[in-house]
Amino acid sequence: MDTTTAYFSRERIVMSFKEEFFTYLSGFGEYEKRSMFGGMGVFIDGAMYAIITNKSLFLRGGEVLDERLSQLGCAKFKHIKRSTTAIVNYYDITPLFSESRTLSNELVEHSIQIARQDKVEKAADKNKRIRDLPNMRLTLERMVKKAGVKDVTSFMELGASEVFCKVRQVHGQDLDIKLLWMFAGAVQGCHWTLLNDDQKSGLLSAVS
C-alpha cells in the first residue's frame, strides 16, 4: 500500500468512527454540533452532553453518573492546550459502546437528563447575583465584575479557571490560589473545601 492510499484509508476510518457516533446519537433526538475542546461538542435543546473525537465518544457526567462512569472504567476527557492539560467532566464510553449498546443507551439518556437539568438551573441563575453563589461575597463580586465578569450567567459560562485568569490580569499575579478553589466551588454549587485533589490539579493546569 503506497503512502497516499494509506492516508486515505486512515481518513475513511476516522470518518466512519465519527459518522457511527453521530448516527447513534441521532437516535436520542435532534442535535447540534460545534467545535469544542479539539473535538465536536454535541448539543440537545441547547445543552451539551457529548464530545466526539476522531476515535472516541465522551459523555458528560454529573451527580451520581460521575461515580458510575468511573466504576465502569471510563477515563475523563483531557484537553491538551499548548503546554497545559485540562481534565473536563466528560467520560470515554467508547469501549462500552462497542460491548453493550443497552448500557450505552442508558448512560446517554442519563447524561442528556443531567445536561438539560443543568441548562434549566443556569437559566434560573439569571435571577441571582454573583455574591449569592457559594463561597462568594460582595467584595469578590466587585472583584470579578471589575475583571469583566458582569453576572452569574457569564461566571458560569466562563468557568472557574477563566474567571480566575481574568481577575488575575486585573488584580495582579499574586492572587491567593484559594480564590480559584472558591470560584470552582461557586460554579459547582459547593463549599471550596469539598473539592478533591484531582479537581484542584485540573484547575491548576488550566491556569498555569
Image (cartoon, grey):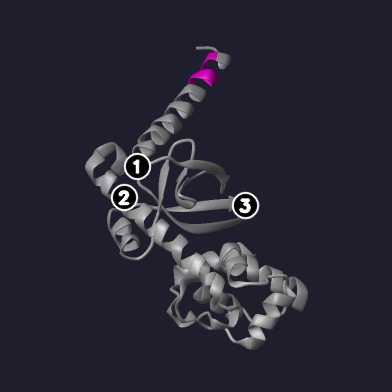
Left or right: where 50 falls relative to 205: left
- The residue that disc 1 covers is 28
Judge by depth and name the residue closer to the eye, 128 or 61: 128
The numbered disc on residue 196 is: none
* Nearest the eye: 83 or 156: 156
- Amino acid at circle 1: Phe
SS for tag 2? helix
Residue 109, numbered label: 2
Q: Residue at label 3? A: 81
- The reply to whether residue 172 is in sight is no
Query: Local crowd at mark 3 within 10 Å, few (<14), some, or many (≥20)?
Result: few
Residue at x-position 70% and y-position 69% = 166
Residue 47's spot in the image, x, y percent?
47, 53
Q: Residue at x 57, y 75 (%)?
A: 183
- Residue 3 quadrant: top right
**Front-most of residues 119 and 16:** 119
Q: Is residue 21 above or below residue 203?
A: above
